[in-house]
C-alpha cells in the first residue's frame, strides 16, 4: 500500500505543479463565462462596415418616412422612381429596393425586397419589426375604440408557476426547476469531461513510460497492479482537486455577488432568501413578492441541496474515473503509440456518448424506465444519475446505483490489471482483441 501511495503522490504532484494545471484551474470559470457571453457580444457588435442603402418605393403613399435608419442600414425615399428593377438598383448604388405594393393593414404580405445578393436575416428582421409596430398602432387608430391601449394592457397577463417542495417534516420550500436542470447538466457534463480529459492522460502516461522503457525499471520494484492503481488514483485526485478549486472559486464569486446585490434588500426578505423561502407549515399562504431577478436567483440557490449534489458528484466521479481510468490504462499498455489506440477507443467512447443522449432526455422524464436503467448501468450511471439527482431520486436507487458501480469498477480494475501486467512489457507487436483475451486468461 505504501508503494501505491508513493506512485499516487508522484502522479499527483507532477501534474498539479504544472503551469497549465494552475492556469486552467483559476481561469476555467472565466473561460466558461466567456464562451457564453462572447457569441452574444459578437452578434451585437459584428456588422458590415459598409452602410447599406435601401431605396423605399411606396406605391400606396401611406408609409413615407415610417422606416428609421438603424445601425448599418440607411433608408432612402426616391422622388421619381416607382419601379423596382435592376436598373433602379444600379442607378442609385442601392444595396436593395424595398417596395410597398399595398396597404399593410389589409395585406401584411405586400412587402417585397429586391436585391442582387442574398439578404441577411438581420436586415429583413429590422424592417419587419418597424412595420409591425407601425401597423399595430394604425390598427388601434382605425378601430375607433376609446382607451384601447388601456384595455389591451389590462388584458396582458404573465402566468408563472412557483415550484414548492415539501420536506420530511412537512415544511414547504420554494424550488427552481430551471436551476435543477442547469445543475444537472453541469454535473453530468463535468464528469463526462473529466473522464475523457484525465482518462486520456492516464493512457498517454502509460504509453510514454512504455515507449521510453522507464516502466521496465519501475516494475522491478513495484508490481504492475500497484503501478496501474497508483497512476489511476493519482490522476483522479488531480481531477478532483481541480473540481474542488472550481467549487471554492464559484462559491466565493457567488458570495461576493450576493453581498452586493442583497445589500439594499429588507431584513425580512433577506431572511427568506437565506432560508430558501421556507414556510412553517404547508397551510401557510404563499405570498408572491415582486423581487429583482438577482434576488430570485439567490433565493433559488439557497433552496437547493448542494451538499447531496456535491457528495454524489464526488462518488460518481471517483467511481466512474476508476472504471474508465483502468480501461484507458489497459489500452495504453496494449499499444506502442497513440495512433494504435483508435481501434480500442470505440467500446469506451460509445457508452459515454450514449449516456449524454440519455441525460438530455432524462431531464424531461427523470423517473422514466430509460433514465432509470441507464442510471443503474455502471458504464452510463455516473453521467445519467447526476441528471436525475436534483429531481429527488429515491435513496434506494442511489445506493443500488453506487453499489453496482463499485462492484463493476472493482472487476474492471482486476481485468485491466491482468492486461496491464502483460501488455506493459510487450513491444513491437500490435495487439488485437484476440490477443488481449489471451492476456486476460493468463494465470498469475
Image (cartoon, rainbow, N blue to C red):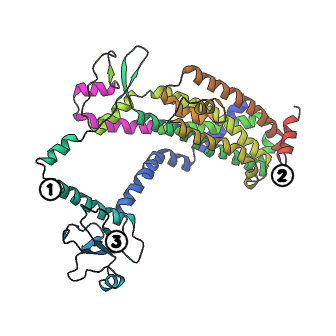
Residue nearest the observer in this picture, 83 or 348: 83
Asked if the stretch drawn in magenta spans residue 272, the answer is yes
Please give the name of the residue rendered at 23% of the width and 32% of the height, measured from the top-left corner.
265
Number of the label disc, if any, that sits on residue 141: 1
Whole-percent x and y of residue 359?
56, 38
* Mark closest to the chain's N terminus, 3 or 2: 3
Q: Are marks 3 and 1 in contact (CB under 8 Å)?
A: no
Q: Which region shows up in magenta?
A: 247-274
- Judge the density around disc 3: few (<14), some (14-19), many (≥20) Cα neighbours within 10 Å: some
Q: Are marks 3 and 2 in contact (CB under 8 Å)?
A: no
Please give the name of the residue rendered at 83% of the width and 48% of the height, measured from the top-left corner.
432
Q: Gap between marks 1 and 2, in whole Å?
A: 82 Å
* Mark closest to the chain's N terminus, 1 or 2: 1
- Judge the density around disc 2: few (<14), some (14-19), many (≥20) Cα neighbours within 10 Å: few
Q: Quadrant of residue 75?
A: bottom left
Q: Main secondary structure of the magenta part?
A: helix
Q: Mark 1, mark 2: which one is toward the viewer? A: 1
Local secondary structure at mark 1: helix
Q: Is residue 295 above or below residue 68?
A: above
Number of the label disc, if any, that sits on residue 113: 3
Q: Is residue 82 above or below residue 272?
A: below
Please give the name of the residue rendered at 53% of the width and 25% of the height, measured from the top-left corner.
393
Q: Can residue 7 be seen here?
A: no
Residue nearest the observer in this picture, 374 or 32: 374
Question: On the picture, is 345 further left or further right than 437?
Answer: left
Residue sitting farthest toward the left: 146
Number of the label disc, if any, that sits on residue 430: 2
Please give the name of the residue rendered at 16% of the width and 43% of the height, measured from the top-left corner.
151
Whole-percent x and y of residue 338?
73, 53
Image quarter where the C terminus lies is top right
Q: Is residue 163 above or below residue 204?
A: above
Q: Can residue 210 be seen here?
A: yes
Amino acid at each position: 500500500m505504501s508503494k501505491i501511495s508513493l506512485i499516487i503522490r508522484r502522479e499527483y504532484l507532477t501534474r498539479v505543479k504544472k503551469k497549465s494545471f494552475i492556469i486552467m484551474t483559476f481561469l476555467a470559470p472565466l473561460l466558461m463565462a466567456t464562451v457564453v457571453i462572447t457569441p452574444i457580444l459578437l452578434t451585437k457588435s459584428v456588422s458590415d462596415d459598409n452602410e447599406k442603402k435601401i431605396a423605399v418605393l411606396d406605391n400606396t403613399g401611406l408609409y413615407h418616412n415610417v422606416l428609421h435608419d438603424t445601425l448599418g442600414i440607411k433608408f432612402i425615399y426616391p422622388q421619381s422612381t416607382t419601379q423596382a428593377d435592376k436598373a433602379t438598383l444600379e442607378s442609385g448604388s442601392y444595396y436593395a429596393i424595398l417596395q410597398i405594393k399595398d396597404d399593410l393593414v389589409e395585406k401584411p404580405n405586400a412587402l417585397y425586397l429586391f436585391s442582387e445578393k442574398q439578404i441577411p436575416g438581420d436586415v429583413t428582421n429590422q424592417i419587419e419589426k418597424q412595420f409591425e409596430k407601425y401597423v399595430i398602432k394604425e390598427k388601434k387608430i382605425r378601430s375607433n375604440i376609446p382607451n384601447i391601449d388601456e384595455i389591451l394592457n389590462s388584458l396582458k397577463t404573465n402566468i408563472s408557476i412557483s415550484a414548492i417542495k415539501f420536506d420530511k417534516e412537512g415544511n414547504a420550500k420554494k424550488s427552481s426547476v430551471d436551476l435543477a436542470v442547469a445543475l444537472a447538466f453541469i454535473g453530468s457534463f463535468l464528469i463526462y469531461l473529466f473522464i475523457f480529459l484525465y482518462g486520456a492522460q492516464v493512457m498517454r502516461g502509460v504509453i510514454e513510460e512504455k515507449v521510453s522503457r522507464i516502466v521496465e525499471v519501475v516494475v522491478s520494484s513495484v508490481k504492475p497492479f500497484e503501478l496501474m492503481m497508483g497512476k489511476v488514483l493519482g490522476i483522479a485526485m488531480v481531477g478532483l482537486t481541480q473540481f474542488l478549486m472550481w467549487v471554492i472559486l464559484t462559491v466565493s464569486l457567488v458570495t461576493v455577488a450576493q453581498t452586493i446585490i442583497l445589500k439594499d434588500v429588507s431584513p425580512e426578505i433577506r431572511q427568506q432568501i437565506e432560508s430558501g423561502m421556507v414556510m412553517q407549515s404547508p397551510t401557510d399562504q404563499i405570498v408572491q413578492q415582486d423581487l429583482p431577478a438577482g434576488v430570485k436567483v439567490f433565493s433559488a440557490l439557497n433552496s437547493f441541496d448542494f451538499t447531496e449534489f456535491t457528495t454524489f458528484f464526488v462518488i460518481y466521479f471517483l467511481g466512474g474515473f476508476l472504471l474508465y481510468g483502468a480501461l484507458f490504462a489497459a489500452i495504453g499498455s496494449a499499444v506502442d503509440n497513440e495512433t494504435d489506440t483508435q481501434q480500442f477507443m470505440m467500446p469506451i467512447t460509445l457508452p459515454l456518448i450514449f449516456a449524454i443522449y440519455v441525460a438530455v432526455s432524462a431531464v424531461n422524464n427523470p423517473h422514466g424506465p430509460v433514465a432509470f436503467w441507464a442510471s443503474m448501468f455502471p458504464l452510463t450511471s455516473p453521467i445519467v444519475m447526476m441528471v436525475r439527482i436534483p429531481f429527488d431520486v429515491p435513496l434506494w436507487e442511489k445506493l443500488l446505483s453506487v453499489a453496482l458501480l463499485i462492484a463493476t469498477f472493482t472487476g474492471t480494475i482486476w481485468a485491466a490489471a491482468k492486461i496491464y501486467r502483460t501488455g506493459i512489457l510487450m513491444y513491437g507487436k500490435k495487439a488485437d482483441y484476440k490477443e488481449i483475451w489471451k492476456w486476460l486468461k493468463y494465470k498469475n
